[in-house]
Amino acid sequence: MHENPGPSPSAVQASREIRTLISRLRRRILNAAETEDITLGQASVLTRLSGEQGVTASELASAEGVRHQSMTATVVSLTALGLVERRSDPDDGRRLLIALTAEGHRRVAEGRQARQEWLAGELQEKCTEEERRAVIATMAVLERLTHD
């Protein structure tokens, strides 16, 4: 009977470096589009809502990995800014759904554009063509990790 020796040292190192880099890169990308009136957490909620017709606060809290009470506070602040609205669920009038307003959609689109421009600019300025091609190839490898 063979025991599984576990991941190789290179797999452990690659895992650690990927997680660290993704965390740092995510913060930098989010900061590129940060506006002074919303937090990174609020921006994350807006982005998550952009692909939805409406979700409950509980669903948002679960998706964002925060407590329901924290999400409720986030939703209240985004509602006050006119970026999200609460409305009755057409399938269950007892539930309230949270969705982006027109202004919320506009802010999400602006944020995406700003983040894309920042990252493309950084890649253009700090990397050679060969390095950019290496990034593209590496992304294909990392993409395989997301498929079962």
Image (cartoon, rainbow, N blue to C red):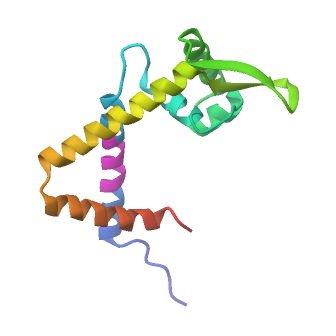
Residue in the image at 50% along x and 82% along y: 3
The outermost residue toward the bottom is 1
Give above or below for 142 relative to 38: below
Is 88 situated left or right of 120 in this image?
Answer: right
Residue 95 at least partly seen: yes
Picture coordinates of residue 53, whole percent (x, y): 68, 34
Which region of the structure is painted magenta?
A: 17-25
Is 46 situated left or right of 62 in this image?
Answer: left
Majority secondary structure in the magenta region: helix
Is residue 112 on the magenta stretch? no
Picture coordinates of residue 68, whole percent (x, y): 66, 26
Q: Nearer the viewer, residue 103 or 99?
A: 103
Picture coordinates of residue 37, whole percent (x, y): 41, 13
Is residue 21 on the magenta stretch? yes
Give above or below for 33 relative to 19: above
Quadrant of the rendering where the C terminus is positioned: bottom right
| Snapshot quadrant of residue 112 | top left
Residue in the image at 26% along x and 37% along y: 118
Give above or below for 147 relative to 76: below
Picture coordinates of residue 56, whole percent (x, y): 72, 29
Residue 65 at least partly seen: no
Is 108 situated left or right of 101 in this image?
Answer: left
Quadrant of the rendering where the N terminus is positioned: bottom right
